[in-house]
Amino acid sequence: MSILRPRGTNDFLPPETAKWQVVEGLLHQLCREFGYKEARTPIFEHTELFIRGVGDTTDIVQKEMYTFLDGGNRSLTLRPENTASMARAYLENKLAGLAQPVKLYYIGPMFRYERPQAGRFRQFHQFGLEAFGSPLAINDGEVIAFGWEFLNRLGLKDKQLLLNSVGCPVCRPAHREALQNYLAPRLNELCPLCQDRYARNPMRVLDCKNENCQKITKDAPNMLQYLCPECDSHFKRVQSFLKAAEIPFTLNLRLVRGLDYYTKTAFEIQSESIGAKGAICGGGRYDELICDIGGVSVPAVGLAMGLERIISALETQGEEIAPEEYTDVYIATVDKEIKTEEAAFALTRDLRNFGFIAEQDLLGRSLKAQLKQADRLKACYTVLIGGDELKSGQAIIREMAAGEQFTVAINEIKKRLITK
RNA sequence: GUGGAUGUGGCGAAGCGGUUAACGCACCGGAUUGUGGCUCCGGCACUCGAGGGUUCAAUCCCCUUCAUCCACCCCA
């Protein structure tokens, strides 16, 4: 057997790629409407960036990174997400010197070494937004509204916005301590994973899917009770903006983002239409990230969406993402004379320059086979060139749906074609 | 990393320890040689993911491996 593509990767081919173009096209357009500009960062970065940015206790850093040494013995890593890179780019390019907030977006492949599953691949594609420079809740609102609006325009029906606040360095320690005190007496009842989380990052215990852990944490102290005045009012403001924009949401106190950099707002948009795990969009505020990777303190908020998941959710909904492909005109030759083929070649070029979707035979097929091909390509018209007509500068136009045809001068063809 | 299912031509899909591996779709060709979509006829798997084993004999049994799908975990 020949070489196959690596596990968890995909070849995207037509007609699949047409769907991607539609989704990405809408993303670019929506970003223009919202004022986010595209940024492109490297596919790989210094490993250190992700360790410090994403957090060394996260699963992503601990077991999912594609890390390698380059020829210069540098440790590099294929980006598992793009927010750390965007923050790095903001610092490195001194974007703090621009008018704030700096609003950027990206689309591209990310890499995580995981077991492939429904909506989960080793190379997958994310779109994301980052707004740097504003500490205000209204910016959180804009980011969430973007995610909601985008999924709306795509026609995604069964979506749900979950909202939570994970606090900030001021209020988190108190909650953390309260949580640990609450869990301590029942520590040995928790699942092994949560026993580990208890010490490192007790908030993640709240997020555990284990039934028993959920039962234990049912009445655990929640973050909202511990929010400092600033986080509390920020969170209330975010909610009031969402209400003002008529975006429905539900508070989910168990929602904890898997990346360490989040502060205050955390949100997730889920859809029933994908496999077991329905997260298609996630994000929040990360006021500490830029500081963590070595800069001054810059407030920021952003989101990321999994494109494979969005497309697959739309598909299970039976949504037609991309319009059906068709051809305006197929140019067929009735004989294999050099003059005929050249005339057909020139005519095809002419029709394309005029704006038609035009195809011609590239395989030396019989006329019958050419018409069959025209039919397959969903041609509205077929132009038949050659024989006696060509000698008098004429050709035949055949309307495929009606099955009728007529003869016209070759230089009149453009005018006689009425297309979709 | 753990668990379950699956792997027959481009796709879908029968088969079963034993002569030429059904069938459907798609594709190619033809039905008096310049015309599609319908119909009819013909063609299209030295081979059943790969490697090894059991057997007189394996696509069908066993082992290994790879891959896919699904779930856990985690994330988008």
Image: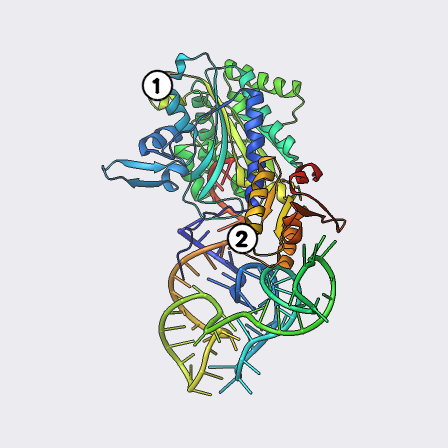
Q: Residues within 10 Å of mark 2 (few under 14, many from 20)?
A: few
Q: Is residue A347 above or below residue B5?
A: above
Whether callout 2 and callout 1 share a subunit is answered yes
Instruction: Give the side of residue A40 with respect to residue A383, left or right.
Output: left
Which quadrant holds the N terminus of chain A?
A: bottom left
Give the number of callouts: 2
Q: Earlier in the sequence, mark 2 or mark 1?
A: 1
Amino acid type, mark 2: Ile
Disc 2 from disc 1: Cα separation: 69 Å
Residue at screen point 65% across, 54% down: A371
Check residue A295 in the rendering and tell me which mark sits there, or answer none: 1
Query: What residue do we see at 61% from left, 18% from top?
Result: A241
- Taking the spot 28% from the left edge, 36% from the top edge, the residue there is A75
Q: Quadrant of the C terminus of chain A?
A: top right
Q: Nearer the viewer, residue A141 or A367?
A: A367
Q: Which residue is mark 2?
A: A338
Q: Which quadrant of the view contains residue A140?
A: top right
Count neighbours of disc 1 (C-alpha within 10 A) and say few if under 14, some if 14 to 19, many if 20 or more: some
In the picture shown, does residue A117 fall above or below B60?
Answer: above
Chain under numbered label 1: A
Secondary structure of residue under mark 1: loop
A334 lies above or below A38: below
Question: Considering depth in this image, is A315 or A60 the residue closer to the camera?
Answer: A315
**Where residue A130 sits: x, y (%)?**
48, 24
What chain does badge 2 belong to? A
Answer with the quarter of the image where residue A33 lies.
top right
Q: Position of residue B45 (x, y in %)?
A: 51, 71
Of residues A11 and A207, the one nearer the viewer is A11
Q: Is residue A379 visible?
A: no
Measured from the top left, where is residue A131 in percent x and y? 48, 20
